[in-house]
Amino acid sequence: MTHSGQVALVTGASQGIGRACALKLAASGATVAVAARNQEKLAELVQQINASGGKASAFPVDVADEEQVKTAFKTALGQLGKIDILVNNAGITRDQLVMRMKRADWDSVLHTNLTSAYLCIQQAIGSMLKQRWGRIINITSVFGQTGQAGQANYAASKAGLIGLTMAIAREVASRNITCNAVAPGFIETAMTSGFSEDFRQNALKAVPLGRVGTPEDVANAVAFLASDEASYITGHVLSVNGGMLMG
């Protein structure tokens, strides 16, 4: 797979899955616009990509803030000229049983995980329509497919991303733009590093492959969906979960 000559914008790129996606796309030839709140980590990522012969630029943004999203995309388009690939990866958790969940925690998760994807797609789609080519990839979750106790807000946001993926896929297919989702299972990231050892062992019992996934496992799936090899795939949810959910 090659993404030479293409521009990819990845949200939540400062760590974990987003960082792995940025590195993978850069390694396959894409110019990568990395977007996240942590400017220091973005700068380190850009330096790493550029030092290895790739091309990357940082665009600090809080994707839950509509004006920041508009500004970041306008700046990226002005600097890089186009956006061929959009990876909506930014996400947070605010876990709590629904009877105790604060409205602010519901709203923050929905805004960051779901509304941000709509905002980013809206800003990137013009460039894709103009060139009649594009790849939109939304990072959802196995819990958007199965639900998860104590994560009503997170599961709802990730399920919403699946519906958004299918709706956008239908809207833009005639313009040679695909929209797909990747649904990771139990992946070793900063978000999962705080889990207790008991939780981890119990979680692994539900994974037929018997191991925790890596951010690179997810990045490989993203790179494939962003490629010409996946040109006849759209509206699809690609599970990267070690067999945790099948069918």
Image (tube, rainbow, N blue to C red):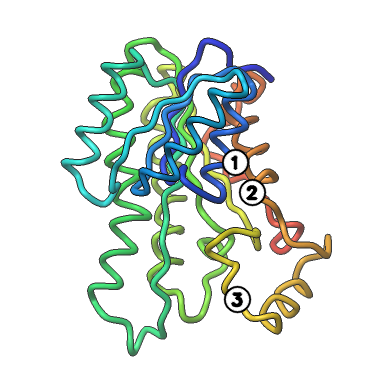
Q: What residue did someone put label 3 on?
A: 195
Q: Residue at x 58, y 28 (%)?
A: 25
Q: On screen, 100 above or below 41? A: below
Q: Residues within 10 Å of mark 2 (few under 14, many from 20)?
A: some
Residue 143, given in percent of the width and then of the height, sits at: 54, 65
- The total of numbered circles placed on residues is 3
Q: Amino acid at mark 2?
A: Pro
Q: Residues within 10 Å of mark 3 (few under 14, many from 20)?
A: few
Q: Amino acid at mark 3?
A: Phe
Q: Residues within 10 Å of mark 1 (few under 14, many from 20)?
A: many
Q: Residue at x 41, y 85 (%)?
A: 97
Residue 57, given in percent of the width and then of the height, sits at: 41, 26
- SS type, badge 1: helix
Q: Amino acid at mark 1?
A: Ala
List the single residue furthest toward the left.
67
Q: CA distance from mark 2 to mark 3?
A: 17 Å
Cβ–Cβ under 8 Å for marks 2 and 3: no
- SS type, badge 3: loop
What label does residue 215 carry, if any?
2
Q: Residue at x 27, y 30 (%)?
A: 123
Q: On screen, 71 above or below 51? A: below
Left or right, 138 with reference to 236: left
Q: Residue at x 26, y 16 (%)?
A: 78
Upstream in sequence: badge 2 or badge 1: 1
Q: What residue did someone put label 1 on?
A: 20
Q: CA distance from mark 1 to mark 3?
A: 21 Å
Residue 212, given in percent of the width and then of the height, sits at: 73, 61
Quarter of the figure that contains the C terminus? bottom right
Upstream in sequence: badge 2 or badge 3: 3
